[in-house]
Image: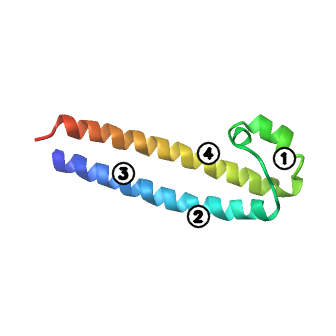
Amino acid sequence: MFVLLISIVIGLFVAMLFLNVYFRVRVLRTYRKLVENRVEFGAAHLFNREKMEEEILPLYPHMRKEIEAFTSHMRYSIRMATVLIALITLFGAILMYFRE
């Protein structure tokens, strides 16, 4: 049981690292396009879709696809990291309980 739990925690950690690298590459590609076109917005716009549509998208209608891709990748990355961190913490707590 202990070995299985350690394997699961290690697997989740590797998955988190892979996801981090994968999304970092995707986010940086999109971010580079946004920077080249001087698109600027804050974190409040990133997490509030209505605010983004009202304030930012009308200013940069030609970059709508890239802006939406960037915000989508960022939200998904944060969500996946949160789930993986919670799972690693849970399995770590179980390992502490079942320590030999």
The reply to whether callout 3 and callout 1 are in contact (CB within 8 Å) is no
Label 1, residues with CA under 10 Å away: few <14, some 14-19, many ≥20: some
In the displayed structure, does residue 84 sit left or right of residue 1?
Answer: right
Choose the circle earlier in sequence order: 2 or 3: 3
Alpha carbon separation for disc pair 1 and 2: 24 Å
Alpha carbon separation for disc pair 4 and 3: 20 Å
Q: Name the residue under label 4.
A: 75
Residue 57 is marked as: 1
In terms of image quadrants, where is residue 86?
top left
Alpha carbon separation for disc pair 2 and 3: 20 Å
Q: Which amino acid does label 2 sit on?
A: Val
Q: Which amino acid does label 1 sit on?
A: Leu
Residue 12 is marked as: 3
Alpha carbon separation for disc pair 4 and 1: 18 Å
Choose the circle earlier in sequence order: 3 or 1: 3
Q: Nearer the viewer, residue 8 or 39?
A: 39
Choose the circle earlier in sequence order: 4 or 3: 3
